[in-house]
Image: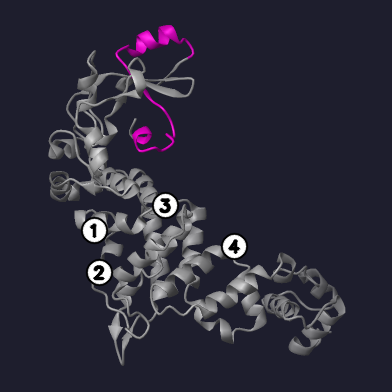
Amino acid sequence: MRDLLLNLEPKDYDIATDATPAEIVRIFPDALLVGVQFGVVLVDDVEVATFRSDQAYRDGRHPEGVVYEKDARQDVLRRDFTINALLLDPWLPHLQPVDYVGGVEDLRRGIIRAIGDPLKRFEEDHLRMLRGVRFATRFGFKIEPSTMAAIRQLRAKIVRVSPERIHDELVRILTEGNARRGFELLDSSGLLEYILPEVAAFKGVQQPPEFHPEGDVWVHTLMMLEGLPPDPSITLALGVLLHDVGKPSTFRIAERIRFDGHVEAGERIALEILKRLRFSNEETEQVIALIANHMRFKDVGQMRESTVKRFLRLPRFEEHLTLHRLDCAASHGNLENYEFMKTRFEASPPEQLRPPRLISGQDLIAAGYRPGPQFSSMLAAIEDAQLEDRIHTRGEALELVQSLFGLPCA
């Protein structure tokens, strides 16, 4: 009902009823008992839940038991936020919402408000604190003061929530729009220091003003989050969030502010974060690559052609480009290197970036060279020459090897 009132297309529909799971199964014999302990049955891929009230919560996530109810009001009062407690009665005319908790008015005013006592709601399920931030981020709403105060009071309990559930909420905060607002709310609520202390450490870490007139690492990162394109991939969003995660630990002042080794430190710290929050190996690999390569753009004017082409053929290079563009736009504003690499990327077909090998290790053996560590250097030199358009044939490749590494031993 919430999405319909916001003129959004609902992603799915759930049904609530006073029928018990046993009664539902009698009507729909093929129904699946996916959460029968909480009164949830799956009928033709639609969740059907029995009206219920919850018994005590002991683990900060699930009730110890439920009591089936006949009154829809009792079912609504156990839910998290008023905007999520709106019902649609198909027997009422004009799709009129059934609202027991003021959710329609909160939707109109753009407010996220916990149902009843917010402290009790968040004590029952600690994840609700993070969900409140996520809903405020997604819809551009404000968090009602007593609801925000309860989050601040209980914020330390977010660490009791499983990493998988924190992962899911963070992904949505980063990719559903308004990511900057989401992280400002995580910060102001106090949740950020518990779920991502490495990012909370950005605040107050100053940067050299000649390169970063915008301010400290926190402000810089917020500006980049604000610039994310619509529906960004999670790897790009995480790359933006974590590209400078190595700066707080490498900050020092010599002749100016310096962050020597911040890229390498960032790779290590980001790897710990991504493992902790259960991101996949594939996602982790791409985010680490974005961090590892984000400073390389400053040197593209001095790179050899072969180095440029190897850079361009990184997997999902378009994400590297976007990260660099956002990095520049949120700092010095110079997009020359971005435009150069964007033009090269768009004009470089795959066969130019990764030409077929002219010779292999077996060819080197056949030519009389003894296998060893030098083979990788030989093959790399051949590929460099190919990428720089200096050789085109197998014979030219063997001649190059002989000129650089000498004739094979007899």
In front of the other: label 2 or label 4?
A: 2
Q: Is residue 148 positioned above or below 310 on the image?
A: above
Q: CB of mark 1 within 8 Å of CB of mark 3?
A: no
The disc at residue 187 is 1
Looking at the rendering, the stretch of residues picked out in magenta corresponds to: 3-30
Q: Is residue 231 left or right of residue 178?
A: right
According to the image, label 3 marks what residue?
A: 175
Measured Cα–Cα span from mark 4 to mark 3: 21 Å
Q: CB of mark 2 within 8 Å of CB of mark 1?
A: yes
Query: What residue lies at 35% left-to-right and 23% top-to-bottom?
Result: 95
Measured Cα–Cα span from mark 2 to mark 1: 10 Å
Q: Secondary structure at mark 4?
A: loop
The disc at residue 315 is 4
Q: Amino acid at mark 1?
A: Asp
Q: Secondary structure at mark 1?
A: helix
Asked whether residue 27 appears in the rendered view, the answer is: yes
Earlier-in-chain disc, 2 versus 1? 1
According to the image, label 2 marks what residue?
A: 203
Residue 328 vs residue 238, the one in the foreground: 328
Earlier-in-chain disc, 1 versus 3? 3
Q: For the view shown, which residue lies furthest in the right direction?
A: 395
Q: Is residue 294 positioned above or below 305 on the image?
A: above
Task: Determine crowd level at label 1: few under 14, some 14-19, many 20+ residues with C-alpha closer than 10 A.
Answer: some
Q: For the view shown, which residue lies furthest in the bottom direction?
A: 255
